[in-house]
């Protein structure tokens, strides 16, 4: 957790979860640091707005989000009842209610057809904090996941976008906005592993190019 301009900002680290039964099971979270031991929930008692970004890496999944008001002892609050996370269609959820802790659970969409869920989480004690550009914006779509392959890849910028949220998992990402040529390991933009940041773009004009080593992931969505 960081304090920026008097506002608490937090990025939770969730392990990729491969389902192994047809019933709901917890997604492990590392908090307050990515190197912290894993637990079954995210301690978010200092946060107002929380944002969670779900991606089905393999096979369609069903997810639910539960909340606690007793420091993670029990989770009687259903924040988000069961919703689908489909391969190729990431899901963004924003939670504004006050909670001590959040638990994420996942199960396969089809019995016996197991898949892997990836989660990126972040939050702030104030919904209007500016994290280098604009984090408190309206999601305009065009989000997704890039599986890096050690080559330059291009992400289309929606016409109404003013900023892009980039989050890494499994390795660093180099990038450039309106680069001449391809992105590479020496491109000026750099996001460390397991980090999240926001950058300005010009909707319908900017070209976003990204590069990462094979096996790493980049999650992104656009705001206005």
Image: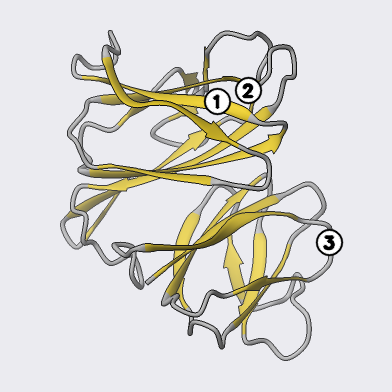
State whether residue 161 is above or below residue 122. below
Say which label, 1 or 2, has the lower sequence index.
1
- At label 2, counting other C-alpha atoms closer than 10 Å, the crowd grade (few under 14, some 14-19, many 20 or more) is some
Element at badge 3?
A: loop
**Residue position for label 3:** 150
Q: Residues within 10 Å of mark 1 (few under 14, many from 20)?
A: some
- 223 or 168: which is nearer to us? 223
**Image x and y of residue 70, in percent:** 19, 14
Circles 1 and 2 in contact, beta carbons < 8 Å:
yes
| Residue 52 x, y percent position in the rendering | 42, 42
Residue 111 horizontal side relative to residue 224, left or right: right
- Residue 102, image x, y percentages: 34, 26
Badge 2 is on which residue?
109
Residue count near mark 3 (Cα–Cα under 10 Å), binned few <14, some 14–19, many ≥20: some
In this orientation, which residue lies closer to the viewer: 82 or 47? 82
Q: CA distance from mark 3 to mark 1?
A: 31 Å
* Residue carrying label 1: 62
Compute the Cα span from label 3 to label 2: 32 Å
- Residue 61: which quarter of the image? top right
- The earlier-in-sequence mark between 3 and 2 is 2
Side of 105 where 181 appears, left or right: right
């Amino acid at each position: 957790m960081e304090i920026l301009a008097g506002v608490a900002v937090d990025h939770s680290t969730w392990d990729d979860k491969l389902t192994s039964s047809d019933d709901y099971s917890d997604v492990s979270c590392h908090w307050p640091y990515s190197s912290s031991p894993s637990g079954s929930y995210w301690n978010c008692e200092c946060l107002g707005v929380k944002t969670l970004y779900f991606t089905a890496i393999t096979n369609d999944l069903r997810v639910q989000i539960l909340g606690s008001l007793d420091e993670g002892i029990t989770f009687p609050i259903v924040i988000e009842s069961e919703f689908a996370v489909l391969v190729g269609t990431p899901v963004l959820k924003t939670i504004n209610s006050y909670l001590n802790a959040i638990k994420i659970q996942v199960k396969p969409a089809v019995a016996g057809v197991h898949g892997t869920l990836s989660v990126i989480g972040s939050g702030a004690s104030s919904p209007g904090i500016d994290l280098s550009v604009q984090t408190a914006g309206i999601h305009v779509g065009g989000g997704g996941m890039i599986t890096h392959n050690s080559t330059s890849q291009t992400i289309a910028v929606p016409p109404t976008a003013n900023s892009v949220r980039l989050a890494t998992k499994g390795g660093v990402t180099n990038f450039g906005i309106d680069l001449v040529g391809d992105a590479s390991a020496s491109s000026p933009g750099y996001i460390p592993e397991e980090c999240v940041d926001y950058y300005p773009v010009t909707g319908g004009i900017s070209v976003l190019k990204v590069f990462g080593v094979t096996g790493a992931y980049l999650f992104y969505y656009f705001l206005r």
